[in-house]
Image (tube, grey):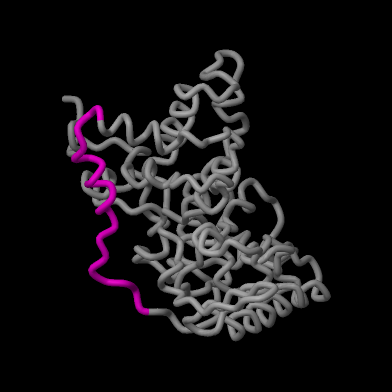
Amino acid sequence: MVECSAKIREISERLLKEGKVDMVIGFRKGALPMMNEPYCAKSPEHIKNLVWDSNCGINLANYLADRKEKIGVVAKGCDSRNIVTHIIENKIKRDQIFIIGVPCEGMIDRHKIASMFEKEIKEVVEEKDKIIVKGNDYEKILEKTDVLQGNCAICIHRNPVIYDELVADLVEEQKDVDRYEDVRRIEAMPAEEKRYYFDNLVSTCIRCYACRNACPLCYCPTCFVDESRPQWLGKGIDPADIKTFHFLRAYHCAGRCTDCGACERACPMGITVRTFTKKLEKDCFELYKWEAGMSLDERPPLDVYRPDDPDFIK
């Protein structure tokens, strides 16, 4: 990871000095452990702040929509797929962005790690495949594979699908991964058990919209939750309104979600928000053999109509 940070700084400094970009969007060290922050470097003097490690889980494609500048952006596999979606949906032009590709071996789950310790975590250090957690009077070494984000543990597209320059060699993609075991388990539940499952899943939701704000796909000028004419749902924490928000947001992401995990990472309540979007991701793959953001030459299945589509009205 140290090598990646150095290469990102080297490329970014060159791009800014040569005037090829107006800024580079990457990460800087956060004020809290496991909380690296998006960072915009606009001059070579700012480059020293750029870092890369397993705490860079925020999807930086979220900061590209409708920008007019020429932008350098650091992108791992899922980020690059969302950038493809942005280009397809005309939110940014390909020639506006210089993609600094980072082959990724997964981001760590800060919620999972925090739940393992009763005392305050002061520092989290990464050394190859080990995560070292330090407090005032303790230090514990964890295996990185044991504390990966849920989406990273089952990711099969860890390398950027498009890039202008790589910071490291491509990594080997994971094989024989069952991405939808949890979805099939829920699908098999009786209706009443399924209803109870989803009621319990979102029971702690406080409607803060952190999942929506972190999602690179949520860029509508006015979100449906903020509409008042007509009003789609109430403003409180009524259980029906909470479920309506989550289900409708998931449908809006259908055929577009790359399972980047930004929604779950942002949730202050630790809700597995991906449960909703993964079901639709599974349906799109099984019905249309579609994976979002893999090609600039194909449009999402819900964006086109073909006579041979499943259940096409004839």
Indicate yes or no whether the magenta region holds residue 233: no
In the depicted view, which residue is nearer to us: 289 or 38?
Answer: 38
Task: State which quarter of the image contains the N terminus.
Answer: bottom right
The residue sitting at 60% across, 21% down in the picture is 235
Q: Position of residue 2 (x, y in %)?
A: 61, 84
Check the image and report above or below for 169 versus 31.
Answer: below
In the depicted view, which residue is nearer to us: 267 or 197?
Answer: 197
Q: Position of residue 101 (x, y in %)?
A: 53, 72
Check the image and report above or below for 31 versus 46.
Answer: above
In the depicted view, which residue is nearer to us: 198 or 310?
Answer: 198
Q: Position of residue 68 (x, y in %)?
A: 70, 51
Q: For residue 146, which quarter of the picture?
A: bottom left
Q: For residue 222, which quarter of the picture?
A: top right
How many marks the image carries: the answer is 0
The residue sitting at 45% across, 22% down in the picture is 240
Indicate yes or no whether the magenta region holds residue 188: yes
Q: Which residues are magenta?
A: 172-192
Q: Position of residue 214 (x, y in %)?
A: 58, 48
The residue sitting at 38% across, 59% down in the picture is 294
Taking the view exactly as shown, the residue that stands out farthest to the right is 45
Task: State which quarter of the image contains the C terminus.
Answer: top left
In the depicted view, which residue is nearer to us: 126 or 295?
Answer: 126
The residue sitting at 57% across, 50% down in the picture is 266
